[in-house]
């Protein structure tokens, strides 16, 4: 065997290790769109809260219910867009959408996310909503870091960014809203664009 | 030429390297998954996995899932150690150039 063959061997090994353990068809475009949904949602919330609620939110008011609905819609649309675009990309890559690697990815992503979501609902029901923005950022960041082992490694850095933003938000709850806008809106657009040009456009 | 001795003849085939690579990072893999990942034919995969099994680098487990036969492969401790040695030897050979 010549040296070229050894090199080829190593790259085959690396390739197969990645392919068999990581789900790599995440779409960068879905990140960009999720960021845009988050920005639209945040703009609507800002408008509602400043116009009807004099800058404060109370749990029993109708404004809060609208804000909750907006938040839900942002999450829902992001997930639907993500699934749609990822399925499309997986088909192009000849990667199956529901196999061992995508199941592991989803499982590891959902553990911190579901735990965090329930925790946030619990403290909301106790009337402590000052930390919500920060907690959402922190748990979402943890979910990304935990999922990054089973997907494109770059989402780890988005995870770290979200965690740091979340910690800052819990230090300065007054800026929670703006940090949320940066974390879920702007960061998604930046990382989504980066991933789109690195992986999608070939 | 001590490096050459670490090049393991048992791994000297694309399909065998492939089987080992997949099993190193997965707890187990079944026949169909391996076949798809490696793009190998049934007979090809069967004969190469048998060779690895004979060397006791992998274990083969046959069972039934929903009454369909299912073959599961996983790597042994010996297989892991030997494969690591093999990769190190490959890398050293490349670096020497």
Image (cartoon, coloured by chain):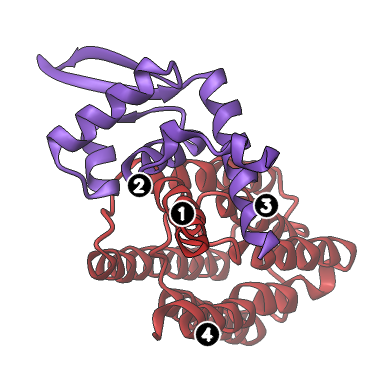
Chain colours: A red, B purple
Q: Are marks 3 and 1 in contact (CB under 8 Å)?
A: no
Which of the 4 image quadrants contains residue A164? bottom right
Q: CA distance from mark 3 to mark 4?
A: 38 Å
Residue B45 placed where, x, y %? 22, 35
Query: Which quadrant is the C terminus of chain A positioned in?
Result: bottom left
Q: Identify the chain of the residue marked 2, using the numbered disc in the image.
A: B
Per the image, label 3 sits on a secondary structure element best described as helix
Nearer the viewer's eye, disc 3 or disc 4? 3
In the drawing, does residue A190 fall left or right of residue A102?
right
Closer to the camera in the image, A172 or B3: B3
Label 1 crowd (10 A; few <14 / some 14-19 / many >=20): many
Q: CA distance from mark 1 to mark 2?
A: 7 Å
**For the point 71% across and 49% down, which residue is it?**
A127
- Against A53, residue A47 (above or below) is below
Q: Are marks 2 and 4 in contact (CB under 8 Å)?
A: no
**For the point 53% across and 43% down, which residue is it?**
A108
Q: Which residue is mark 2?
A: B14
Q: Which residue is mark 1?
A: A9
Q: Which residue is mark 4?
A: A193
Q: Residue furthest left?
A: B67
């Amino acid at each position: 065997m010549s040296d070229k063959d050894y090199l080829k061997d190593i790259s085959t090994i690396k390739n197969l290790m990645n392919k068999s353990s990581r789900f790599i068809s995440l779409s960068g475009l879905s990140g960009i769109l999720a960021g845009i949904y988050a920005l639209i949602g945040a703009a609507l919330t800002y408008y509602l809260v400043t116009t009807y609620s004099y800058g404060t939110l109370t749990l029993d008011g109708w404004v809060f219910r609208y804000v909750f609905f907006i938040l839900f819609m942002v999450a829902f649309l992001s997930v639907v867009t993500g699934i749609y675009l990822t399925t499309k990309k997986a088909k192009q890559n000849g990667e199956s959408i529901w196999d061992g690697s995508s199941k592991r990815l989803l499982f590891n992503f959902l553990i911190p996310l579901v735990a965090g979501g329930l925790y946030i609902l619990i403290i909301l029901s106790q009337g402590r909503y000052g930390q919500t923005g920060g907690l959402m950022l922190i748990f979402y960041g943890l979910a990304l870091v935990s999922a990054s082992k089973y997907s494109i490694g770059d989402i780890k850095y988005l995870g770290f960014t979200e965690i740091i933003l979340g910690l800052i938000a819990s230090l300065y709850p007054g800026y929670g809203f703006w940090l949320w806008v940066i974390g879920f809106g702007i960061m998604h657009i930046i990382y989504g664009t980066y991933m789109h040009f690195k992986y999608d456009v070939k | 030429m001590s490096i050459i001795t670490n090049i393991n003849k048992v791994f000297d085939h694309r399909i065998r390297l492939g089987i080992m690579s997949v099993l190193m990072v997965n707890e187990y893999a079944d026949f169909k998954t391996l076949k798809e990942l490696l793009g190998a034919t049934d007979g090809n995969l069967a004969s190469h996995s048998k060779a690895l099994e004979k060397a006791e680098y992998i274990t083969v487990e046959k069972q039934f899932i929903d009454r369909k036969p299912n073959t599961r492969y996983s790597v042994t401790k010996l297989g892991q150690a030997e494969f690591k040695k093999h990769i190190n030897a490959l890398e050293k050979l490349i670096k020497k150039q």
